[in-house]
Amino acid sequence: MPIASSLPARPGHSAPLPVTWSPVALNARLDAERALHAVPRLPLRIVAEARLTVGRIISQVERRELTQADATELLRDVAHRLAEARLVEEAAHASRADAPLHLG
């Protein structure tokens, strides 16, 4: 539900005031961004989709199209999915590293 229409504009400007992220929402945002940087070996498709999702969520909050509470939940979900994907990739990488070499 858009919430921008109920917000006051700055004097002399038609745009609403910039969003001040709540500590909880900001923490979720930073966790999602850290999770994106912690996944260098994931397939590019997964990282690109997550990066687009995080950017879309941030933009929607800043345009006041998404509440910070909803954004917090969505950002936490992205961070959780990235963490799970990273664990799966690390396990696969470890099993490949432990596999015996076939020489010859």
Image (spheres, rainbow, N blue to C red):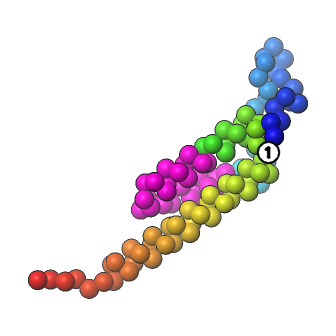
Q: Residue furthest top?
A: 12
* Residue labelled with disc 1: 67
Residue 37 left/right relative to 97: right
Q: Which quadrant holds residue 77?
A: bottom right
**Which residue is depicted at the point 87% across and 26% down?**
8
**Which residue is depicted at the point 75% across and 32% down?**
18
Q: Position of residue 91 (x, y in %)?
A: 45, 77
Q: Nearer the viewer, residue 4 or 13?
A: 4
Residue 88 left/right relative to 9: left
Q: Main secondary structure of the magenta part?
A: helix
Count of numbered circles on the image: 1
Residue 37 left/right relative to 81: left
Is any atom of residue 27 visible in this view? no
Report helix, strand or loop for mark 1: loop
Q: Position of residue 40 (x, y in %)?
A: 44, 59
**Which residue is depicted at the point 78% across and 17% down?**
13
What span is colored magenta in the figure?
29-54
Q: Which quadrant holds residue 96?
A: bottom left
Q: Residue furthest bottom?
A: 100
